Each structure stands twice: as structure tokens, then as C-alpha cells.
Image (cartoon, helix red, strand yellow):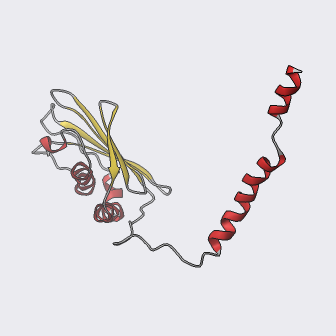
Amino acid sequence: MHRSLTSARRRPRPGRRLLPALIAVLLPVLAACSGGEQAPPPGPEPVAHDTVINVVRNGGRPFRDESAVVLPDGSWRTYHRGLDRASGTLTVQQQAQLTALLADPRLREEGLQSYPPAGCPEALRVWVYVVHPDRTFTVGYAECPDAAAPPVAAGIARLLMDSTDWVGARAAI
């Protein structure tokens, strides 16, 4: 008798299977018939750039290892010595600035050039990795007062340092 009670409890009733299916079918229909559309969020819409950007700063004394990653939707995450530090989202204005920098034709040329450190071995090295569906490239340079930094890549690095909670970012630039 104990066995029949256990098997009776395991068998779902037909109504319990029907209710989720009914909700799944009716919910889209009712939403379409509501007649009202949701109001768009206030302010301008974010600018999409379809690019993942990773900026890494490392080196120096004491040794630093910091990075920031920005996804196409403007969400960002920062890391310090490989550990997750902070996250957030760029503002619409910051995304527009980033999109303008990514559209600058000089950026692609900067990826083809070399920017070796000039006389400052303890300088931080900055690597800007740009990953786009059509192109992927890296721009590396040293944060030396007497070295020429690539203007667009350095602009991207500065924008991310200023826009995110990047550990020690303002100390060297």
C-alpha cells in the first residue's frame, strides 16, 4: 500500500501540465493585443559600435597589471592583477566618443606601426586590443613623456580610464 501512495504522488495531474502551456501560448497574444507600446527611455539612444575593446596597462615599478574591457552595448568591466574589480555601463556621451574614436581612420594605421619605448624602461605599457567583426588589431605603446603615443589609441585608453573605475588609472596619465 505504501508503494501505491508514492506512485500516486509522482503522477502529475493533467491540469498542471496544461496551465504552463496555456500561459506560454496566451501571453504573446495578450501582449500583442494590448495596443500600447512602451515609451522609449528618455534621452538619446546609445550608439552601437559592434566592437569589443580591451585596454591593458602593465609594467612599471611597482609592477602594475590593470585592464578594462568594453562590450558593444557599452557595458564595461575592470580588472586589477587579473581579479574582477568593478563593472558598469558607459553613458550615451561616452559611447558616442568611443564610437567616434573607433571610426577614426588613423586607428587602423596605428595598428600597423610600432611605438617602442624611448628611454624609459620603467614606463607602463599600454595595449589597446580592438576586436570587430571586420577587423582585429592591437596598438601598443609606452607611457613615456618623451615618446610619441598613437593619438587615437591613446584617446581610447584615456576615455576608458576616465569613464571606468580603473585602479590607478589617473596616476600615470
State the image coordinates of residue 162 (x, y, percent, origin top left): 21, 51
Left or right of residue 151, residue 41 in this image: right
Q: Nearer the viewer, residue 102 or 67?
A: 67
Q: Measuring 33% from the left and 49% from the top, which residue is drawn there?
A: 88
Please tell me whether residue 110 is drawn above or below residue 58 in the rendered image. below
Image quadrant containing the N terminus: top right
Q: Residue furthest bottom?
A: 35
Q: Measuring 79% from the left and 52% from the top, which residue is drawn there?
A: 18
Q: Measuring 80% from the left and 32% from the top, which residue is drawn there?
A: 9
Q: Residue furthest left?
A: 145
Q: Nearer the viewer, residue 39 or 13?
A: 13
State the image coordinates of residue 68 (x, y, percent, origin top left): 32, 44
State the image coordinates of residue 147 (x, y, percent, origin top left): 14, 45
Left or right of residue 122, residue 76 in this image: right
Indicate the quadrant where residue 47 lies. Answer: bottom left
Please tell me whether residue 71 is drawn above or below residue 30 in the rendered image. above
Q: Measuring 85% from the left and 32% from the top, which residue is drawn there?
A: 8
State the image coordinates of residue 59 (x, y, percent, origin top left): 22, 31
Q: Nearer the viewer, residue 53 or 142?
A: 53
